[in-house]
Image (cartoon, grey):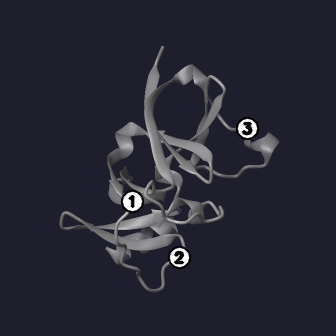
Amino acid sequence: MSERQVVVFKLQGEEYCIDIMKVMEIIRMQEIVKLPDTPDFVEGVVNLRGKIIPVIDLKKRFHLEGKEISEETRIIITDTDGKTVGFIVDNVTEVLRLNEDDIEPINTDVVGIDKDYIAGIGKLENRLLILLDLNKVLTKEEKSILKEEE
């Protein structure tokens, strides 16, 4: 049975996860430099050991209510389509293994979801984890905006 290792994090109380192979590191929230004329979910950039990294607020990207930044807020630094991008999340809770059999695709016809970035729903005991495909969280146009800002 094939397994997938994922990093689990929360946004507005819901559990999401991403493939650990996409995660470069997880850092505490730090000062973000705002950039002019960018979409509202682009928080700005951070300087991580001399490298300028664009930072996306996933709650804003998914049109979720914002939550105050807290001690638990984290930035997940990822490799997204060959680019280093940070994603702000409420908190990172754990790393775990999901059996491929426990990941169900979203039936977009039934639920009316037209979101390519949801790779599936992971079932773990009495929990449901929304599995994200980070390569599809941003549109091509949004990726090109980030590229210009680097």
- Mark 1 nearby-residue class (10 Å; few <14, some 14–19, many ≥20): many
Q: Is residue 22 left or right of residue 111?
A: left
- Mark 2 nearby-residue class (10 Å; few <14, some 14–19, many ≥20): some
Whole-percent x, y for residue 108 in the image: 73, 43
From the image, state whether disc 2 or disc 1 is nearer to you: 1
Q: Nearer the viewer, residue 25 or 69?
A: 69
Q: Residue at x 48, y 71 (%)?
A: 42
Between disc 3 and disc 1, whose residue precedes? 1
Disc 2 + disc 1, Cβ < 8 Å: no
From what the image shows, is residue 80 above or below residue 129?
below
Q: Residue furthest front?
A: 71
Q: How far, Cα to Cα, is label 3 from label 1?
A: 29 Å
Q: Amino acid at mark 1?
A: Gly
Q: Residue at x 70, y 52 (%)?
A: 114
Q: Which residue is mark 2?
A: 39
* Numbered badge on residue 107: 3
Q: Is residue 78 left or right of residue 10?
A: left
Whole-percent x, y for residue 133 in the image: 51, 46
Q: How far, Cα to Cα, is label 2 from label 3?
A: 29 Å
Q: Which residue is mark 1?
A: 86
